[in-house]
Image (cartoon, coloured by chain):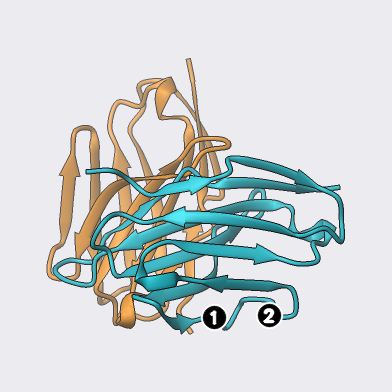
Amino acid sequence: KQEVTQIPAALSVPEGENLVLNCSFTDSAIYNLQWFRQDPGKGLTSLLLIQSSQREQTSGRLNASLDKSSGRSTLYIAASQPGDSATYLCAVFQGAQKLVFGQGTRLTINP
Amino acid sequence: EAGVAQSPRYKIIEKRQSVAFWCNPISGHATLYWYQQILGQGPKLLIQFQNNGVVDDSQLPKDRFSAERLKGVDSTLKIQPAKLEDSAVYLCASSSYRGRAEAFFGQGTRLTVV
């Protein structure tokens, strides 16, 4: 059974810092890995999708990497801003489009 | 392209009452998911449909929860009777079976059972 773990569970940093969020998964037989952002009381917004054949994807100040063999992904946020404060979730796609989530990292950027 | 639509956004009911949530996925998306998200936790899959067939409902409490996807498009999730521990956000998502798999979520329904 696939298990997805996100570390740390919560992170608080001052504005302007670069930071890394971690995601690990136990079964490397995945198709894609997707990073989401969730604001309080809202649904999930897709940030980046990394296909299994890719090693990284970039969107603006966000960069996500994937190492399937070691079961790890990282989300790098450059020059953090208060508006980046949210919960970040990673999820892996397996066979039959099963989508398994981690518990999320709650990020707070302090002005 | 319209996103995933869910309704209602909020619902407050008393325990033992029934409630229903509705979801309209992105047009053409064959896969539809219902997740339950309790405050402070990651989403937990309740049921996954492929067109109008069930792929996975292993974590659906079938004594009180039911879901259907008529004609492989819209879906309804029902709880009857509700318990206090059902208070959560219920998220609907869809993905395309063809090409790369990418999930898109609706805004969710926040259910409070009192």
Colour chain A appears in: orange
Q: Which mark is residue B62?
A: 2
Q: Residue B106 versus residue B69: which sits nearer the camera?
A: B69
- Identify the element where label 1 is drawn: loop
Q: Helix or strand or loop: what does disc 2 sit on?
A: loop
Residue at x 36%, y 65% (from the top left corner): B73
**Could one spot residue B72 in this view of the protein?**
yes
Q: Chain of mark 1?
A: B
Which quadrant would residue B46 be assigned to in this image?
bottom right
Which of the 4 image quadrants contains residue B81?
Answer: bottom right
Query: CA separation, marks 1 and 2?
Result: 9 Å
Q: Tell me what residue is drawn at x 76 percent, y 60 percent.
A: B18
Image side of residue B14 versus residue B26, left or right: right
What residue appears at the point 13 percent right and 64 percent down from the top-left corner?
A54
Which residue was labeled with disc 1? B57
Of the numbered discs 1 and 2, the one sitting upstream in the chain is: 1
Which amino acid is tagged 2? Lys
| Category of crowding for the residue at label 1, using alpha-carbon neighbours closer than 10 angstroms: few (below 14), some (14–19), many (at least 20) | some
